[in-house]
Image (cartoon, rainbow, N blue to C red):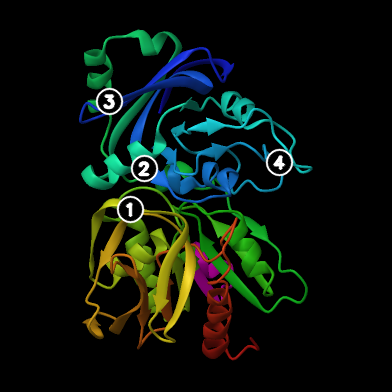
């Protein structure tokens, strides 16, 4: 939620970052000049900042980059994961003086300014990250130019007046307005109805690479919309907000499960499957964000390094299958850092999900096999060749 913004800068305009507990850091404006508020989160990826900025799951969040040097590869026209930058604000330590990549088309600072994204540079992002790890994700404001010159009490009041992420139903704010089709690459083998809760462009591309024609549907899609595509399988994407506040996607998924249509969900889609099965969800202290999170696939024992962006998790038993309205379900993946549920697998209906992002732009690609697992699930259910 960005307020007044004017122009681009890397200084000398002053900027200040204010957390809701009163901690402040002062630096220089980076991107648009003005003010913004949102939820403060940190991302641990060393690369892929363009994909991070354009991930709709970051809607209404101010992202602190733990990697100190940002902007060195500029911005290109190929790596965006959606039609625009979604972060509410951007926090970096040492911005690149100029881009150095043959693929670069624009400087990052100029792209942030052009899209009205208020940021701050020259701050100790390591200290901010440690603070968020100790105190948890919280509301934050970034103020630059004239906005940064207001009193600390005024700025803190503005931050504390921002809405909380808990209870926020945001998928409808980032979803496509109209359905569109991503054609299969090569021979078409399956038709997939993908419900866009904040989908990243690489996700349907990964499915298309495996012969799936993907019909991307708005978050408001109905079962009739799904059936009209002739779908062999249904996919629910990643997305922002509190899964506990999402009612329509849960009801829609239950209708899909009732019909035993093969289902695959990632990130927000994993949380929606958890709720459809009767499990609860809860907010993590500071979430998992970055492209270096270790996860174990409990069905194979394989450890994967994976891409994450989630602040909520499913509360499901990890010690064995649980009974649900759709038969037995089990936790298929767990995070090796903290034991958080990272995947679900239904044993009596054709459905599974993971909490992370197997499309993995900008990497790693350890989890790409999950799209093949989805193809196998559709093949088993429909009799078509995987």
Residue carrying label 1: 287
Residue sitting nearer the eye, 122 or 7: 122
Q: Is residue 7 above or below residue 354?
A: above
Tag 1 secondary structure: strand
Within 10 Å of disc 4 (Cα), the crowding (few <14, some 14-19, many 20+) is some
Q: Quadrant of residue 164?
A: top left
Q: Position of residue 31 (x, y in %)?
A: 54, 24
Disc 2 and disc 1 in contact, CB within 8 angstroms: yes
Q: Is residue 329 rendered magenta in the image?
A: no
Q: Earlier in the sequence, mark 1 or mark 3?
A: 3
Q: CA distance from mark 2 to mark 1?
A: 8 Å
Front-lying residue, 160 or 9: 9
Q: Indicate the quadrant where residue 255 lies.
A: bottom left
Q: Quarter of the image containing the N terminus?
A: top left
**Residue at (37% x, 59% y) in the render:** 249
Q: From which residue to which does the magenta span run? A: 225-234
- Determine which of the numbered discs, if any, sits on residue 227 in the image: none
Q: To which residue does mark 2 refer? A: 41
Q: Which residue is mark 3?
A: 159
Q: Callout 2: helix, strand or loop?
A: strand
Residue 233 forms part of the magenta stretch: yes
Q: Which residue shows up at 67% across the image and 60% down it?
A: 182
Q: Marks 3/4: CA distance?
A: 33 Å
């Amino acid at each position: 939620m960005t307020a007044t913004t004017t122009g681009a800068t890397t200084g000398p305009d002053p900027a200040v970052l204010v957390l809701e507990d009163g901690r402040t850091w002062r630096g220089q404006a980076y991107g648009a000049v003005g003010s913004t508020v949102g939820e403060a989160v940190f991302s641990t990826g060393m690369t892929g900042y363009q994909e991070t900025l354009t991930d709709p799951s970051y809607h209404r969040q101010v992202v602190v980059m733990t990697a100190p040097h940002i902007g060195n590869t500029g911005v290109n026209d190929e790596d965006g994961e959606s039609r625009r930058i979604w972060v509410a604000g951007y926090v970096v330590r040492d911005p690149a003086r100029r881009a150095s990549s043959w693929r670069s088309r624009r400087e990052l600072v100029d792209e942030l300014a052009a899209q009205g994204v208020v940021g701050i540079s020259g701050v100790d992002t390591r200290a901010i990250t440690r603070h968020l790890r100790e105190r948890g994700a919280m509301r934050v404001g970034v103020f630059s130019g004239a906005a940064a010159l207001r009193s600390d009490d005024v700025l803190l009041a503005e931050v504390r007046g921002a809405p909380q992420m808990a209870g926020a139903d945001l998928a409808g704010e980032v979803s496509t307005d109209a359905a569109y089709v991503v054609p299969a690459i090569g021979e078409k083998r399956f038709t997939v109805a993908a419900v866009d809760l904040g989908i990243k462009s690489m996700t349907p591309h990964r499915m298309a690479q495996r012969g799936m024609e993907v019909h991307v549907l708005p978050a408001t899609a109905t079962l009739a919309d799904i059936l009209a595509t002739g779908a062999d399988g249904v996919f629910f994407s990643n997305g922002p907000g509190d899964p506990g506040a999402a009612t329509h996607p849960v009801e829609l998924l239950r209708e899909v499960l009732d019909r035993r249509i093969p289902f695959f969900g990632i990130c927000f889609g994993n949380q929606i499957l958890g709720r459809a099965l009767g499990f609860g969800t809860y907010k993590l202290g500071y979430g998992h964000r970055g492209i270096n999170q270790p996860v174990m696939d409990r069905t194979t024992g394989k450890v994967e390094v994976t891409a994450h962006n989630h602040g909520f998790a499913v509360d499901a038993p990890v010690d064995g299958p649980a009974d649900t309205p759709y038969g037995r379900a089990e936790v298929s993946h767990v995070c090796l850092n903290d034991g958080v549920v990272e995947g679900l697998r239904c044993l009596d209906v054709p459905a599974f999900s993971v909490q992370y992002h197997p499309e993995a732009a900008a990497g790693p690609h350890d989890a790409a096999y999950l799209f093949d697992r989805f193809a196998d699930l559709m093949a088993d259910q429909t009799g078509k060749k995987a």
